[in-house]
Image: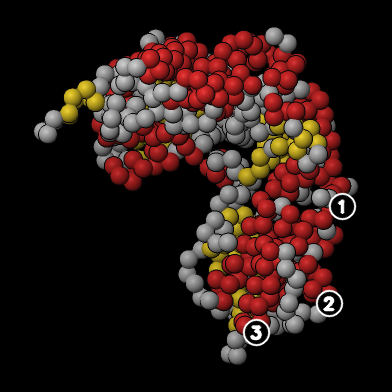
């Protein structure tokens, strides 16, 4: 396998300049995630409106290119979606990374699909899967209003 | 023995990793094993296996003798005074836990103080943390400077009448700092404070003489010393092993068991309850023989040469920053590459067949002090060559290219 399959230009670019970083105004949900093996940390801030739509989504954190790019792409893709749609996208993403399945969600345009699929190379690097999935699990935790920090070792 | 050709004694180096020859630079984590060690394990299980101790059949007697031979070899390897001072555990972590638990039980009271340092591996901090929790003891951290050296004067200032023990690493697994433990031990003993030395990184890489150091406890693990997993070694002065309570109870550690009392076995069995990693301990003797056949002086000279070569080459790369610059450094090199996270470095290097470690290396206290979340670490073993370092350097140089950085 080629290392460039993992480090695609989209990933490198998002890793270098992650979108939606920081604490968004008026967030009403948040969650923290931690990978004890590598020390990666992520803090997701989510603003849900009355009709359970993601009005805003940002994150703070430090980590490798994969984890930053994944979090950055996640915020772009999920913003504006309903919680139900956001979960579908998340499940699509996790399934793609773990089981090599295609993206089924109808709620992503082609550009968004390209972005999410740029992370598919991670599945060939089992030790890096958790770098890519931590922010998504943390988003899920925020949407569900869970109190405990997400520990990458305790989730799939 | 020609140290340059030592790789040929390690079967793993004839394998390809990602279609590349293996460049193994993760020996601080665990070392690879020479054929003599691998063969011994197979041989023992194939031809000699028996448990040790109780049975009186031929195989049991042989295994018991062989087990004892390793103990004598270990005693000689670290120059302990008697073989009763050598206790086998499952790893160095268990050895340190043994001391913290039994010493703590007997000697630590509320408000007592334990000194560790900011260089410690989690295995030489967390066992003491248990005492902080259970006994309301206090843990004080001797600070390090930016070079990664322990500030000895500051350590001295931490000692009070309540200090009950000092636990310090002999060699940092992040910066490669060789700690002047003898000086610390002398200082501590003037105030009757015992010292535990974490020897995980020193035992494989420098000549260790526990009698000269005069340490009270010295712990190391077999798997870092070219031996099998499952073997930890605790050296402790006899006076402590006689005085401290046993750690794990069960078979083999008793001399007499009645309904109303239990008498414990003499040393060293007092601390070796249950079936031990018999085959691994017996095999470990081959690891010591392997090191003796090279000679620790030759090994140190070789590793120093490779380390200096690696430092010199890596320092020439503008984007590389070496973490720590200790006065006395062994073959552990933690580094950063500008704009490339250590985990990405490890993945990219792996594509070159170069095995390093990335993360906090079980030293979060150190990383927090240095304001780092993770580092990449190349650590040298006796089998590494200048050619290995050349490939490391080439792979490191390529990291920024993969990242489209100049």
Pinpoint the chain carrying mark 2: A
| Residue under label 1 | B404
Distance CA(mark 2)–CA(mark 1): 25 Å
| Residue under label 2 | A110
Report whether A15 appears left or right of B97: right
Q: Are marks 1 and 3 on the same chain?
A: no
Secondary structure of residue under mark 3: loop
Q: Earlier in the sequence, mark 3 or mark 2?
A: 3
Distance CA(mark 3)–CA(mark 2): 19 Å
Q: Could you say where residue B301 lies in the image, as x and y percent from the top left?
A: 68, 14
Tell me whether circle 1 and circle 3 mark residues in contact (CB < 8 Å).
Answer: no
Q: Residue at x 71, y 37 (%)?
A: B355
User: In the image shown, does B134 or A8 lie closer to the viewer?
Assistant: A8
Looking at the image, the residue that sits furthest to the left is B260
Where's the N terminus of chain B, which quadrant?
Answer: top right
The numbered dot on residue A82 is: 3
The numbered dot on residue A145 is: none
Q: Residue at x 59, y 24 (%)?
A: B38
Secondary structure of residue under mark 1: loop
Secondary structure of residue under mark 2: helix
Q: Residue at x 57, y 27 (%)?
A: B224
Tell me whether circle 3 and circle 2 mark residues in contact (CB < 8 Å).
Answer: no
> Is residue A121 among the parts visible in the rendering?
yes
In the picture, residue B246 is in which quadrant?
A: top left
Pinpoint the chain carrying mark 3: A
Rendered view: A99 above or below B88: below
């Amino acid at each position: 396998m080629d290392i460039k399959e993992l480090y695609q230009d989209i990933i490198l670019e998002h890793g270098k300049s992650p979108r939606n970083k920081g604490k968004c105004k008026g967030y009403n949900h948040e969650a923290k995630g931690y990978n004890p093996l590598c020390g990666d940390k992520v803090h997701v801030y989510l603003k849900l409106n009355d009709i359970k739509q993601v009005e805003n989504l940002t994150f703070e954190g430090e980590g490798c290119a994969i984890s930053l790019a994944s979090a950055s792409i996640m915020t772009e893709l999920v913003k504006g979606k309903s919680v139900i749609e956001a979960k579908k996208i998340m499940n699509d993403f996790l399934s793609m990374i773990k089981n090599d399945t295609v993206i089924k969600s109808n709620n992503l345009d082609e550009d968004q699909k390209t972005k999410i699929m740029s992370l598919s190379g991670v599945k060939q690097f089992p030790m890096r899967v958790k770098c890519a999935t931590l922010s998504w699990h943390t988003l899920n935790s925020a949407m569900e209003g869970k109190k405990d920090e997400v520990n990458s070792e305790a989730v799939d | 023995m020609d140290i340059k050709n030592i790789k040929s004694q390690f079967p793993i180096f004839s394998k390809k990793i990602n279609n590349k020859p293996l460049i193994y630079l993760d020996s601080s984590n665990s070392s690879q094993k020479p054929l003599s060690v691998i063969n011994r394990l197979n041989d023992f299980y194939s031809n000699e296996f028996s448990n040790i101790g109780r049975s009186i059949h031929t195989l049991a007697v042989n295994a018991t003798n062989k087990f004892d031979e390793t103990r004598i070899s270990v005693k000689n390897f670290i120059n302990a005074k008697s073989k009763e001072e050598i206790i086998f555990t499952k790893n160095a972590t268990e050895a340190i836990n043994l001391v913290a638990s039994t010493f703590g039980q007997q000697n630590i009271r509320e408000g007592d103080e334990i000194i560790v340092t900011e260089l410690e591996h989690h295995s030489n901090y967390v066992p003491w943390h248990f005492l902080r929790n259970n006994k309301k003891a206090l843990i004080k951290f001797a600070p390090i400077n930016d070079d990664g050296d322990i500030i000895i004067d500051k350590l001295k200032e931490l000692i009070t009448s309540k200090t009950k023990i000092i636990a310090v690493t002999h060699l940092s697994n992040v910066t490669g700092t060789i700690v002047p433990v003898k000086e610390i031990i002398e200082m501590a003993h003037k105030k009757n404070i015992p010292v535990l030395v974490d020897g995980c990184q020193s035992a494989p890489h420098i000549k260790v003489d526990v009698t000269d150091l005069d340490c009270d406890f010295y712990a190391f693990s077999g798997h870092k010393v070219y031996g099998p997993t499952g073997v930890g070694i605790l050296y402790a002065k006899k006076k402590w092993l006689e005085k401290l309570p046993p750690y794990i109870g069960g078979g083999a550690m008793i001399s007499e068991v009645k309904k109303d009392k239990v008498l414990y076995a003499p040393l060293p069995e007092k601390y070796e309850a249950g079936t031990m990693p018999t085959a691994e301990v017996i095999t470990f003797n081959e690891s010591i023989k392997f090191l003796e056949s090279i000679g620790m002086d030759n090994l140190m000279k070789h590793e120093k040469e490779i380390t200096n070569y690696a430092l010199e080459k890596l320092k020439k790369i503008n984007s590389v920053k070496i973490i720590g610059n200790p006065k006395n450094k062994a073959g552990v090199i933690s580094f950063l590459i500008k704009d490339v996270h250590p985990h990405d470095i490890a993945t990219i290097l792996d594509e070159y067949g170069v095995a390093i470690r990335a993360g906090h290396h079980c030293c979060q206290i150190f990383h927090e002090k240095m304001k780092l979340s993770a580092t990449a670490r190349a650590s040298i073993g006796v089998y590494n060559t200048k050619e290995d370092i050349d490939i490391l350097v080439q792979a490191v140089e390529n990291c920024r290219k993969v990242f489209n950085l100049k």
